[in-house]
């Protein structure tokens, strides 16, 4: 599979993705039963994960989105900018951040800092993909779909310079 100037190979099938998304949703249903969690999806990458996860959330809950940017090409810059802020008040709420991937952890650290300022009751992170070997911060990730090696992925919301977000499966960069 080709995107722009790179070749990618299949890595995680849609079927396996949906299985793990469902498993994460069930864990959240169990942990947040009477807490009316506020899901905060991180655009653009988490749109597909958020949609499939929320279809499997059966407890009272709300969802909103924020938009940040931290990546150019296939390397994290370690710098994060806010493009759309949080519009639902977070004070006293039980927040679950929905991310497509935690790589260096800089994005999530920035988000945690920003949301903590609003004094939520709790904040936890749910990410579809987690690259433990790339982590450069000490953030705790509570819900993980898949732990993956430190390689570049596209599909299911993840992009390479804007391309590939619509793919149903996840592909990894061929080296
Ligand atoms: P971090 O700040 O380094 O943890 O990176 C987080 C953000 O970088 C994610 O929300 C993604 O948007 C992007 N990112 C990290 N790794 C990948 C990848 O393998 N493919 C596509 N985007 C990625
Ligand atoms: Mg992202």
Image (tube, rainbow, N blue to C red):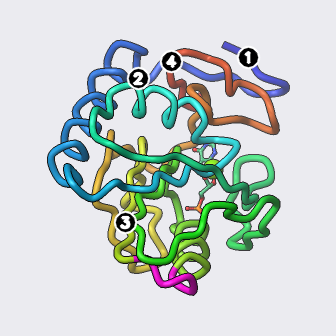
Measured Cα–Cα span from mark 1 to mark 3: 41 Å
Q: Badge 1, how many Cα within 10 Å: few under 14, some, many 20+?
A: few
Left/right of residue 16 with respect to residue 116 in the rendered view: left
Q: Earlier in the sequence, mark 2 or mark 3?
A: 2
Instruction: Residue under label 3, please give it.
Output: 94
Location of residue 161 by image quarter? top right
Whether disc 3's CB lies below 8 Å from ligand 1 is answered no
The answer to whether residue 93 shows anywhere in this view is yes
Cβ atoms under marks 4 and 2 closer than 8 Å:
yes
Judged by depth in the image, the label closer to the viewer, 2 or 3, is: 3
Tag 2 residue: 12
The residue located at (61%, 32%) in the rendering is 157
Q: Nearer the viewer, mark 3 or mark 4?
A: 3
Q: Nearer the viewer, mark 1 or mark 2?
A: 2
Which residue was labeled with disc 4?
169
- Residue 45, image x, y percentages: 63, 41
Q: Earlier in the sequence, mark 4 or mark 2?
A: 2
């Amino acid at each position: 599979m080709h995107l722009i100037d790179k070749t990618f190979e299949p890595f995680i099938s849609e079927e396996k993705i949906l299985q793990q998304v469902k498993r994460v949703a069930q864990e959240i249903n169990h942990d947040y039963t009477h807490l009316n969690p506020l899901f905060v999806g991180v655009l653009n990458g988490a749109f597909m994960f958020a949609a499939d996860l929320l279809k499997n959330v059966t407890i009272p809950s709300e969802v909103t989105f924020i938009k940040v940017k931290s990546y150019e090409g296939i390397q994290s810059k370690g710098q994060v900018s806010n493009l759309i802020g949080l519009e639902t008040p977070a004070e006293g709420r039980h927040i679950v951040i929905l991310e497509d991937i935690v790589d260096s952890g800089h994005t999530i650290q920035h988000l945690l800092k920003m949301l903590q300022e609003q004094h939520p009751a709790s904040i936890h992170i749910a990410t579809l993909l987690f690259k433990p070997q790339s982590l450069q911060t000490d953030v705790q990730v509570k819900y993980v779909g898949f732990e993956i090696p430190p390689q570049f992925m596209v599909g299911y919301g993840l992009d390479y310079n804007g391309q590939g977000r619509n793919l149903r499966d996840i592909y990894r960069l061929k080296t």
